[in-house]
Image (cartoon, rainbow, N blue to C red):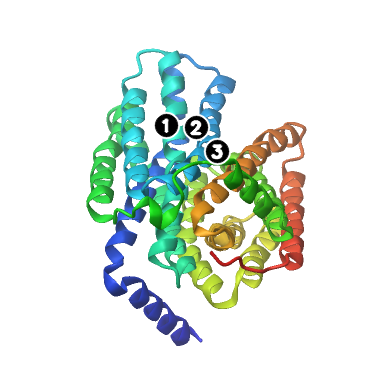
Amino acid sequence: MVSGLIKSGRQEIAALRSNGRAKVLAAVAFPWALLLGSRMALPVLLPHIQTEFGLSLSIAGFLITLLWLGGAIGQLPGGILADYYNERLIMSFSVGLVVIALTCVVLAPNVLTLFIAVMLWGLATSLYPIARITILSATYPDRLGSALGLTMATGDIGQTLIPPVAGTLTALFFWQVGLGFIIPFLIVGGVGIWLILPERSQSDSATTIISTETARYLFEELRRPTMIFVSSILILFFFFWQAFTSFFPTYLVVEKEISTTMASLIFGIFFAAGAIVKPIAGMAYDRIGMRWALIAVLVGPVGGLLVLPIVDSLAMVLVATLFISTMLGNGAVTQSFIAEQFPQKIQGTGLGTIRTASAVVGSTGPVVFGVVADRGFFNEGYIGLAVVLLVVIWLTYQIPIKKTSG
């Protein structure tokens, strides 16, 4: 069985590299790792930022909320731009705008500038994801799941490596160095996008005018039972994802009495495991379809969440974390599936609409979970999240899967 998996993996890699497509995949994936890694570096640097600007805990938390909110609300405009302009232009612009925003964050002379720069950072980052999917869809029409899964895996590598580096540089120097070191790499990534990605003409991807007819067509697509099911799945998953990631390190420290350093390490292992899971989930989507691929990556997290409150040893906590980490394969499955549901001319707009709506509604997860934890129900909160995933699994099993030809 292992040899079969290795053989399949080699075949997928060979297919992804065929016809000179590997350079496109690399040009898309490298900046994505930097964008996600820099975003996860902010919580690591937050205590230092809080001290320098004299922020309370609630105001410091609101700073991170602005980053995530900006990343949510900008995805619909990002999807529309990806449909009506060239992906190379949109992705280069996104990375360039992040460079400007991070520079403003590092040089911020006061709190107002800091908050505006962080909001801009989130909005700039949000322009990248949809264009990334549409260019991969055009480049890999036969293996979108594998290509997207591998790209997402590089994002997890960024989230695993960049925060510890940022923390180390901050300890050696100051927090501006811990965040600023990412800027030169982003510039390299932006230039790479511009030089490597093909310049698809507008006629290849979409009409040039956002019309009432286009809006009506999009609305009809979103009303289909399949899209209603998928939208519900994404809303619940975003709720789960943001609630879990916002409080998991704190939970390990408060409830499991694990040191802050070890909790950060376990959190890093969680993302590192995702780098392995996502390509496998993408290959599974290409081979067995959305329903069973998604169920496969969500069964383990249900078990891990139910076990987590009752285990005490560090080893068992780590095992439970690894089981939960398979949920990171969700995106390679759901986003590939959604992309293939929309005709190419509105693919970016459709993806942006669903992702923005799901992320904004799902952003209530940390607030709800925080209220539960404040009342002393930390463990019960994670059991509740397991129930949320069970509902997602049930919806996935019930979904009427029928692809729309583009």
N-terminal-most mark, 1 or 2: 2
N-terminal-most mark, 2 or 3: 2
Q: In this view, does 137 lie to the left or right of 374?
A: left
In the rendered structure, find residue 72 and report the number of the disc placed on it: 3
Label 2 packing within 10 angstroms: few (<14), some (14-19), many (20+)? many
Q: Residue at x 53, y 47 (%)?
A: 349
The answer to whether one can see residue 277 in this image is yes
In the rendered structure, find residue 307 and report the number of the disc placed on it: none
Q: Are marks 2 and 3 in contact (CB under 8 Å)?
A: no
Which residue was labeled with disc 2?
A: 67
Which residue was labeled with disc 1?
A: 121
The quarter of the picture where residue 393 lies is bottom right
N-terminal-most mark, 1 or 3: 3
The quarter of the picture where residue 370 lies is top right
Residue type for callout 3:
Ala
Q: Are marks 1 and 2 in contact (CB under 8 Å)?
A: yes
